[in-house]
Image (tube, helix red, strand yellow):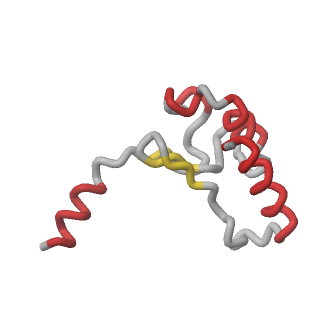
Amino acid sequence: MIYKSAIEKCKGVKHLWSCSWNEGELPDGLKINTKLVQFLMKDGRNQNGKFFCEIYDNVFLHYRAGGNWRKEGIEFHQQYSKVLKEALI
């Protein structure tokens, strides 16, 4: 039952779902990166003051939609990826 134990381990992962959280819920370890906070706040994909990106287990940032399933265009994702890279380095 390896599969079941893997599922059980994943149940403890905290997940901040897309468009369900805001700056007040940002994990403390990420708040210190002001460039990342600004990236999240200025993301044009945000809805009603809630961040489009997701956070898993307080450390993993999921950019979302990089495969262009929302049909935003390659230029959009190239630009946003560049801004995100600058926020992370």
Residue at the spot 75% in from the left edge and 56% down from the top edge: 81
**Residue lying farthest right?**
75
Q: Is residue 45 left or right of residue 9?
A: right
Residue at the spot 68% in from the left edge and 34% down from the top edge: 37
Snapshot quadrant of residue 14: top left
Residue at the spot 25% in from the left edge and 63% down from the top edge: 7
Snapshot quadrant of residue 74: bottom right
Residue at the spot 60% in from the left edge and 34% down from the top edge: 22
Q: Is residue 87 above or below residue 27?
A: below
Q: Is residue 58 above or below residue 7?
A: above
Count of numbered circles in the view? 0
For the C terminus, the image quarter is top right
Snapshot quadrant of residue 78: bottom right
At which x and y percent is residue 43?
Answer: 76, 45
Q: Is residue 13 above or below residue 73?
A: above
**Residue lying farthest left?**
1
For the N terminus, the image quarter is bottom left
At which x and y percent is residue 12?
Answer: 29, 47
At which x and y percent is residue 2?
Answer: 17, 71
At which x and y percent is residue 73?
Answer: 83, 70
